[in-house]
Image (spheres, rainbow, N blue to C red):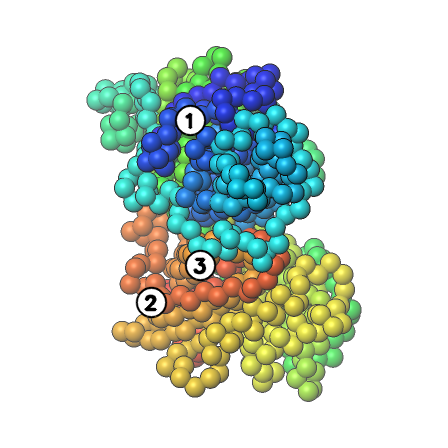
Amino acid sequence: MDTNKTTYNRRSFLKASLLSGGGMMLSVSWLSSFKAADKLEALNLPPQWSQLNAYIQITADNVVKLLCPNPEFGQNVMTSLPMILAEELDVDWKNVVVEMGHHDNTKLGPQFTGGSNSVRMYWKPLREAGAAARQMLREAAAQTWSVPVDDVTTKAGMLQHSSGKSAKYGEMATKAATLAVPKGMKLKAPKDFSIVRKSKKNVEGQKIVTGKPLFGLDYRQEGMLIAMIQHPPAFGMKLKSFDASQTLKMPGIKDVFSLKLYEDSFEQGGFDTRTFNDLLVVVGKTTWEVMNARKKLKVEWEPAGDTKDTMMGRGGKREVTVPGGLESTSAQLDKMAEYAKKSAQQLRKDGDPETAFKNAAQIIERTYNAPFLAHNCMEPMNFFAHVTEEKALLVGPLQAPGWTEPTLSKILKLPADKIEIQMTRMGGGFGRRAYGHYLTEAALISKKAKAPIKLIYTREDDMTYGIYRPMYTATYRAALDANKNLIAFHVKGGGIPEHAIHANRFPAGAVDNYLAEGWEIPSNITIGAFRAPRSNFNAAAEQSFLDEVAEAMGKDPIEFRLELLKRAKESPVGKNNEYDPDRYAGVLKLVKDKSGWNKPGNEKYHRGVAAYFCHNSYAAHVVDMVTRDGQPYVERVLSAMDCGIVINPDAATNMVQGAVVDGIGNAFYGALTHKAGAAEQSNFHNYRMIRHNEAPKQIEVHFVENDLDPTGLGEPPFPPVFGAVANALYKTTGKRHYNQPFKPVLDKRI
């Protein structure tokens, strides 16, 4: 792990915009000094790099380095982003290296990994940076050779002229850096791509498989101590008192103390979510010593009661009351059933759905439920912090440094330019690491302990600490006329503490009479983004229900969806329909074709289909299920995606395959329940995850080919998996499934 620190401030950053040591700079962002990458060592290049004002740095030997702004947690942005740059720059891919940039949202932008936005966010800026750099190199060569710039061509990092003159990019970098950065450069047409759309190996693959230090847990600093937090045994409780006398006698223990995460008057930002505000901390030399010593604590807990938080968000400042009490899953289900009968907030209304339902010949009504889910990142939550009165260094896995830094600045009472956040590769995120409370906890502990520390959560800490996928329910109704035509559609959804309804998505816009409603129940059980937030439940329920409606109408489930999409295209109902009917229909047609839907040869499978739009992309799956040892098993999945231009096909395929396995596992097994405020699952012995032998033997992924700008891919394949599994289960068992996870229900029938 590179621990070199830059000494550049904003003034020296401006000075660094001048030429430095044979490199080239583009006025986009800046690059700190790093140790040489493995690729540079292999090329026998010197380890020194010139400081640049750019995404791009070019050495005299034609090595191009990209500072990756967005955190990496397996979505492969550290490969795909430099591929975009290298394409427009026209360099040899084998001479491209990339490193993770430290946090600086002034110079590097949002630096946010989430919402499937990394490639979408940087697609245009990186292309423009690469094209501008290439033009500057051409102009430098033209001036050097006294030829028109239009006569200078490039190929794989070389500049060429018809006279026979040629030069490496690196030979012209010094001169090019003195030129003005051009704007409005013409970008390559997709048909001319030579790097984008071609599969490239993960640039960190070798480091991952050889165990090189990449992750937060790998990070070490001399004199570093280990810290762990003892949190209350249940939501709705808080620290009353503690006796640490026996803990302090344990080997290696340095200190035990309590502190507050946020003071009472603290105004929380949108991602300052936290569960327990009073921290009881044990600090010691090693993880093992701290874990054992923590067991010796004698702690008294008390009811927290209702608490008030001041929140800052898109709607401005608001007061939020967090209810007290010890919640249980059984009572929560009863409460949701009670709320479902009450009036709710109208989210969208087209036509006259009330009259349509009143006059319907047949009404289909179904209710779907899903539990809290834990994120379960494979790398336990952790962060390093070294905080003094003058500055703070934070190192670890984090999805949203730009949203965490302001909180740190306020709590530590340090200006932002005195806070350095270095981001390591994340061993999983799924939304869990967008909430920076654990980083803030580490900073406060370091400040109190007056030492560099690494805060570590055990698996039990994380699974019982909160920030879960919410608990959801939704009731769907469809009205059919005497000829079994769909004349009205109604969805009413709720949850703890939020609902999952996306009112302007399909089938909105395809039904004359449409109503969407939502309601919410406050809770002290903290929730947060979970891969494809809200969509992961909404798609499951909606796509299951559409299959039931298709069956009642006597229609093939794919053809039924295509008919609705045709209506949404040719004669759309209402306004603000979020989806493109053509693209939505495109993935359904592609998966129908590739799966051989309803064609001979697939009789051994029980087939389920689902499709969904979210995060600007379209996904469809056909799940092929069989019975194995008396149990339903997903043997094969065929997937179709429309996410625009696919940067790195192999990596994109892997991402869809991962989403499919993740979706199957959560659909069958995922559930976190509570009793008297306490999580009933604490580790993988009682929180069931999918196992290797339960994953499909084959996951075949196909992409719609188009030249549209790239959109999301990390999240869109995930939501429709749930619905496809549910629909395949119906074909397998003859029973519809309305409650996730499906496996406990299946076990009761055996």
Image quadrant in which you'd find residue 183:
top right
Horizontal and vertical percent position of residue 476: 61, 68
Residue at 35% of width from left, 55% of height from top?
Answer: 689
Q: Residues within 10 Å of mark 1 (few under 14, many from 20)?
A: some
**How far, Cα to Cα, is label 2 from label 1?**
43 Å
Q: Which mark identifies residue 697?
A: 2
Q: Residue at x 66, y 63 (%)?
A: 580
Instruction: Give the label on residue 653, or none.
Output: 3
Foreground label between 3 and 2 = 3
The residue under label 3 is which amino acid type? Thr
Label 3 sits on a secondary structure element that is helix
Q: Residues within 10 Å of mark 3 (few under 14, many from 20)?
A: many
Residue on which the image places disc 1: 34
Q: Earlier in the sequence, mark 3 or mark 1?
A: 1
Q: Position of residue 706 (x, y in %)?
A: 59, 62
Residue 495 relative to residue 601: left or right: right
Looking at numbered disc 1 in the image, what kind of residue is underneath it?
A: Phe
Residue 539 lies in quadrant: bottom right
